[in-house]
Amino acid sequence: MTFALHGTPVSNGIAIGKAVLISRAALEVSHYLIEVGKEEAESQKLLDAFEQVRLELAQLRKGLPKDAPQEMAAFLDVHGMILSDPALTEKPLTLIRTQRLNAAWALTTELNDLLEQFAEIEDAYLKERANDIRQVAERVLKALNAQKKDALSDSDLLSPSDVGVDAIIVAHDIAPHDMLRFKEHAFTGFVTDLGGKTSHTAIVARSMEIPAVVGVRHASEMIRHGDWLVIDGKQGVVVVAPDDQLLAEYRLLQAQDIQETRKLQELKYSPTATVDHVSIELLANIELPEDATQAVELGAIGVGLFRSEFLFMDRKQALPDEEQQYQEYRRVVDLMQGLPVNIRTIDVGADKALGAGSDLSETGTSPLGLRAIRWSLTEPEIFLTQLRAILRASAHGQARIMIPMLAHVKEIDETLRLIEKAKQQLHQRGLAFNPDIQVGAMIEIPAAALVLPLFINRFDFLSIGTNDLIQYTLAIDRADHAVAHLYDPFHPAILNLLFSIIDQAKRANIPVAVCGEMAGDPSMTKLLLGLGLTDFSMHFSQLLLVKREILKADVGLLKSRIAAVLQAIEPEDQAKALHKLLS
Ligand code: PEP
Ligand code: MG
């Protein structure tokens, strides 16, 4: 039966393919397709794991002390019976043999199906058996993980083999670093239950340039492994089991979309200026050094935001040392061929967790907690290591330091002191760096915006992180789908705050950019131009779309109409003023 699900659109384009369902415990369990011919060996692995758990339980049962509670023996008996029931192995074995799912994936797929069926049962006793099944399956999964041959490296999390047609990942949630890992593999789309437009998972999905819809609430429960799906990344719609007519319509839209993308390429080489000859700077946001290649190809005149934390977020690896970081930063600087590169110092915490192998104090998941520069200042050795690596890269090009989430003058002073210390350390080691390296601050906390002169006086450039500025001004967690509808870039408070920051920076003659998602949203381009913005930093996939808007814009006219937008507090007044501005 055809039905549609709605969520938050995060990445343009249309994807058509079959659902690859990642279970809730997905990223704890390896998911990959086994090689052709290895089906029987994989089936045997599953049977061995069952046998191993059966033996373990039998031993436990035998060794039960005489005075052990009766329930204990009964409990082990029930688990023993579940293990011996061929029904639990039957479907996973079929999945391994026909769809080449690895053993752990096949078992979790079956487990989820069973749990769903149990959830519908009214009888309380039978309902309780769901827990027994879960516990048994988890024991078997543990046994599977313990089999060395099945213990996968992260890169095997999902291997690229196709599933017969284009595959679309459907998951409850995907952590940003796992999303990044999918980048190496050939998937045509993503659907997740959780997440908002500017959650880091969404940002990484966008950077992969494939259609994605997040915050689709119950998608992972309603979509079945192998269902045909259409994802409309622009409208935020997921069509499940589309009929032939719908499929044909979407294929047409997909073709038009591809055509439009091709046409956009023609804009690559023209200068970026408005009709009234105001020159605009387009910079790129990148998560990985290799993204810089495409940024240059698409005409970015620098990297406005290199989210360096993605180098630190591999769950199994220790943190990269100074030399490894230096090599990565240098790679970006080299790829950018003399153009500026703003290396944002590590911004972990909130929805971005550090590598588990790092053995470091917890950053926590609250966006109000120990995040970004706050965390760096509690780990001065790690911070100094990163600063030295960036400084060393500055000997080869225009590497610049950009600090996230500053609010307090104490934080600024301490940060600048540590930058000087890092310079001294390199000097003592006789290593080259640019002593006049530019240091910039992100303006992403309302408090910083409200005392902007503090930042203007101490930094070489500013970059407005609208994703966080909106989050903190409107007091909504940007990764929480429950409040995603309140995430409103058009809120008059946001527009006035943006105008104030840009205006003050321009008057003080200090460069100011916007590097939040707003800068890459073509429907916002004219508004930002009207607010006086001339430096836009965005994911490279958005560069030409935004450029097309710039080429059509008249900044003089937009600026003359912006006062009405800023003064409009009532929604109807704002709608009228915006309509006039954008018409
Ligand atoms: C922002 O907050 O707007 C920003 C660009 O940084 P991030 O999205 O990485 O928090
Ligand atoms: Mg931010």
Image: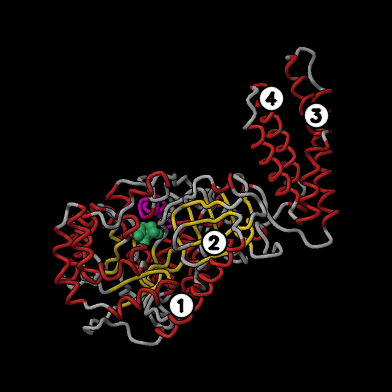
Nearer the camera: disc 1 or disc 4:
1
Q: Quadrant of residue 520?
A: bottom left
| Circles 3 and 4: CB atoms closer than 8 Å | no
Q: Is label 1 in a helix, a strand or a loop?
A: helix
| Residues at marks 2 and 3, CA–CA distance in whole angstroms | 40 Å
Pick the residue in front: 413 or 330: 330
Q: Residues within 10 Å of mark 1 (few under 14, many from 20)?
A: few
Residue 478: percent from left, percent from top: 38, 50
Residue matched to label 4:
126
Pick the residue in front: 326 or 295: 295
Q: Residues within 10 Å of mark 3 (few under 14, many from 20)?
A: some
Q: Which mark is residue 180?
A: 2
Residue 87: percent from left, percent from top: 80, 37
At a point 54% along the width and 55% down the height, the residue shown is: 191
Indicate left or right for 199 with 441 as reference.
right
Q: Residues within 10 Å of mark 4 (few under 14, many from 20)?
A: few
Residue 4: percent from left, percent from top: 52, 52
Nearer the camera: disc 2 or disc 4:
4
Residue matched to label 3:
80
Considering every residue shown, the one lying at the far top of the view is 67
For marks 2 and 3 on the same chain, the one whose residue lies earlier in the sequence: 3
| Residues at marks 2 and 1, CA–CA distance in whole angstroms | 27 Å
Q: Which mark is residue 260?
A: 1
Vertical order, 473 against 544 (above or below): above
